[in-house]
Image (tube, rainbow, N blue to C red):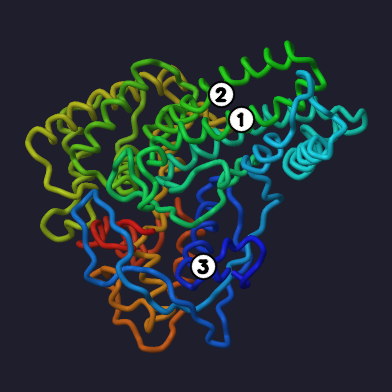
Amino acid sequence: GSGPTPFCRSGDGRAVLRSSIREFLASEAMHWLGVPTTRALSLVVSDEGCTVNRPWYSGSYQMPRGQKGDPDVLIEEPCAITCRASRSYVRVGHLDLFARRVARVDGVYNTSSLEWVELERMVWHATYRDFREECHVPNQAANNVAGAAVCLAEQSMDALSSMVAGWIRVGFAQGNFNGDNCLVSGRTVDYGPFGFMEEYDPTFAKWTGSGQHFGFLNQIEAGLANYLVLLESLLPVIEAGWGREKARSFHKRAEKTARDLFPEKAKQVFRSKMGFHPMAKETAIDGLWEELELLLRRARADWTVFWRRLSIATGSRQVMSNNTCTSEDADLILDDLVGDKENSPELGAFYKPLSDRDRQDLLSWILKWQSALRDHTSQSCGSEVTSKEDATCMLPGDRMRLSNPKYVLREWMLAEAYTRASPSSYQGRSPRSEFAPPVNEQRDESLIHELYELISDPYGEGTAEQEFQYHRRAPEGAMSAGGTAYMS
């Protein structure tokens, strides 16, 4: 954001207020959501009135639901910088680049070449910055770079799979999840074309260039692909230290473990979101998510509102071993999800009225789910819950509230914040909530602070005002508007 540098790729090297506000708030939101992330240290806007022209969307830009389009106008935006902090910024792409530079001579790596030395230095740097106690300290004294590389591969596998699972849990799509935007430490980086999903869509992503391969649930596969690039990049160093056969054997084992681990971490998330212990590997429990996934799509459910309302409904009708969920109970839970259709329809969990078929299928699912919860709670805790220290005996409603946030940064909230902060640049370009106050002509940064306070307690209930304003579905028009539903 500071201007032209050798790395600005022929651009002007400037960041703008809109993207800087989004990046600042989103990285802090992810921290408080419990998802590994880089942090935002500060947000500074040019006090000299420095501006640049950027492609963006006119206020009338709309596409049919589910489709995306590129910006149609140039707008003048204030320059700004978000300063980000992290233990390191070593990316999978860094190690990939240095590994591609080393070459074999007669089938053997030239370990005296500058390219080889640079690759080893990258391995040492990555372990020192990101996994010091686990990988660097045990191997550094003996100069065992192969051991450090093996440890890095193992630690990064767990970290990356946990990060992606965290994204799924809170409804986050990174948007452009290639190796250049993937830290080996498993911390979220590159808050550019990201978005928090509102209406559930397994292929959701804000960026017009995401394609389905970076879509919401496909991030599990994308994360695995990034990890396999890292594993391949570390192989030359491991092979030079261990020999080809032993190194290839490790590579094969690590790849198999990763192919199992990434989808398993996602399954653990779905179990927790439904109130089960994450390590409960019963086929019937995982089948409940597979059945619900189709229903969420068909009923056009809001990802955050649905899960949070389900958590509260479960907590208020706490499942214990001696309780049976009746059809009347299931009706009440579904009514909690639908909300007050007459007075506050926008606060319910669905973006369309439920059809008779949707309602019956959801009721059937609720009965099966509650029965499975009752059996699971009985097996885990008996009829009395005495301890929550390891979460084994946590009641379903309690576990669900810790897995399902009430507040995430929806794009229309961010758009409102940057519009108020620079009305001359952004006013009239994004759909606004019906309860939003008029935008002043003067810069008003108060909503940035208000949202920062909101995201600092995403699992809490919030005030009555916060609940009314922010625990709700997207306003009409936001699901198809350029710059809100999608962006480039």
Which comes sooner in the sequence, label 1 or label 3? Answer: 3
Left or right of 374, for residue 157: right
Q: Earlier in the sequence, mark 3 or mark 2?
A: 3
The quarter of the rendered structure image containing the N terminus is bottom right
- The image quadrant where one finds the C terminus is bottom left
Q: Amino acid at mark 3?
A: Ser
Q: Position of residue 371 (x, y in %)?
A: 29, 22
Horizontal and vertical percent for residue 410?
A: 37, 58
Q: Which residue is mark 2?
A: 258
**Residue at disc 3, secondary structure:** helix
Q: Which residue is mark 3?
A: 20
Earlier in the chain: of badge 2 and badge 1, it is 1
Asked if the residues shown at circle 2 and circle 1 are in contact, with their CB atoms under 8 angstroms apart, the answer is yes
Neighbourhood count class around disc 2 (C-alpha, 10 Å): few under 14, some 14–19, many 20 upward: many
Question: Mark 1 packing: few (<14 Cα in 10 Å), some, or many (20+)?
Answer: many
Q: Give the image quarter of residue 244.
A: top right
Circle 2 — which element?
Answer: helix
Q: Amino acid at mark 2?
A: Ala
Label 3 CA crowd tier, 10 Å (few <14, some 14–19, many 20+): many
Task: Identify the element where label 1 is drawn.
Answer: helix
